[in-house]
Amino acid sequence: MTTLDTALRRDTTVIGVVGAAHFFSHFFQLALPPLFPFLVVEFGVGYADLGLIPATFYLASGICQALVGVWVDRYGARPVLLAGLTLLAVATGLAGFATEFWMLLPLAAVAGVGNSVFHPADLSILSTKVSPGRMGRAYSIHQLGGTLGYAASPVVILTMALAFGWHTAIVLAGVIGLGMVGLLVASGDLIATEPGARSARRAETPGPGAPPAVGYAALIARPAMIMAFLYFLLSAAGGTAIQSFSIPALKFLYGLPIEYASVSLTVYLLASACGIFLGGIIADRTDRRDRIAVGGTAAATALMLLIASGVVGWAGALVAMAAAGFFMGATAPSRDLIIRAATPKGATGKAFGFVYSGLDMGSTVIPVLVGTMVDQGLPQAVFFTVAGLYALTILTVLHINRRPAEAGTVG
């Protein structure tokens, strides 16, 4: 019992620290989008212009993420995670001093570089430090932390902006993030993938008779990796459209004041958090995780179409947003376990770095496109676009499911 209790305490602490770091990754991703209505007035730009901010952020993050995955395997996750969160917090805080719109773009790029570390570093830590029997719940709490960061950001940022102005709100957000950096420093070797800052790759070196390590090019060329990359790209594009532009879209489509429209996004994200929590429990108890991914995404697709129709009224839209968030959240732990199962030993950082770069690439393309839809007075097109993207993610899951032997032998 003593050994079991010690392992439980260790796992719980590691999961909690990593989940808290992931909270701030997502919190900072949504630090500026809730302020877009303020920035339109402040800088005299349109929503398509403002779409360049998340596009720049995610482009930088996506480009760097695959490289960061290699660094995590080589040098260990903890120093990479510390550097990334510091960059993200500082760049976000400095955005509060911007006096011209263009100043926000290089800061968004620097913040994106900082954001690139979280998935390869976090998931490498969890994969090597948490007991296998708790892995589904570990990934669930990790994703839950990120989703709660998304949910908290619009409320916290808008509240501070209304009280102190948007400049001060962003500076305060950066200061709060530096507090989390201090917590990571205090965690010491708890989240080090190997004491002495050596690599997770070395920690996972196969023993005698084990298959040789897989090269980076061979790893990312595997059909399972390519399909997983596309899955994340498409689902992230849909999610970014919701997170960046659902507030003005709902405002125009249903005549909601901005305060209530922002609440609908928070409800969507909180419901997603509930789905993630339940999805983690389910993922540890089933081996048909592809069904969870397909079923949850199909339900969310139908709900986006319902919102786009404009016939449900603002209350119905609020309920539909919550339900869609729940169903998409429930798919998250299963998708992460699918990727882990397809990852060779010693390649955790590289695999998650490559696959999750799809999240950033998908998030790069969509903001300007969707922002243009809002500028053109087509708020319903935002939700139709999200529905189409979610429907395409189902095809990628089904494609992977046609190759069960291949997917099963990868890990």
Image (cartoon, helix red, strand yellow):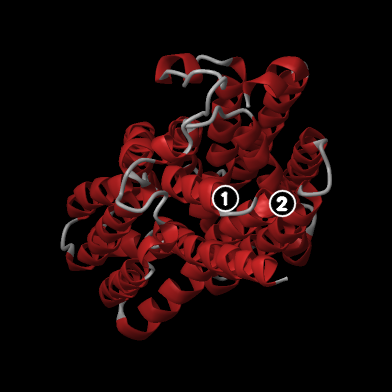
Q: In this orientation, does residue 256 appear?
A: no
219 sits to left or right of 173: right
Instruction: Name above or below for residue 272 compared with residue 223.
Output: below
The quadrant of the picture occupied by the N terminus is: bottom right
Name the residue rendered at 18%, 62% in the picture: 98
Name the residue rendered at 56%, 71% in the picture: 257
Name the residue rendered at 33%, 45% in the picture: 57
Residue at the front extreme?
Answer: 208
**Which of pointers 2 and 1 indicates the residue nearer the eye?**
2
Residue 206, how many percent across, how many down? 51, 28
Residue 133 got which mark?
2
Residue 69, how many percent across, how many down? 39, 36
Determine crowd level at label 2: few under 14, some 14-19, many 20+ residues with C-alpha closer than 10 A.
Answer: few
Depth check: give the residue in front, 82 or 206: 206
Tag 1 or tag 2, which sits nearer the N-term? 2
Residue 47, how many percent across, how many down? 39, 49
398 sits to left or right of 66: right
Depth check: give the residue in front, 61 or 378: 61
Q: Which residue is mark 1?
A: 242
Q: Secondary structure at mark 2?
A: helix
The quadrant of the picture occupied by the C terminus is: top right
CA separation in Å, label 2 and label 1: 34 Å
Q: In this orientation, does residue 386 appear?
A: yes
Q: Amino acid at mark 1?
A: Ile
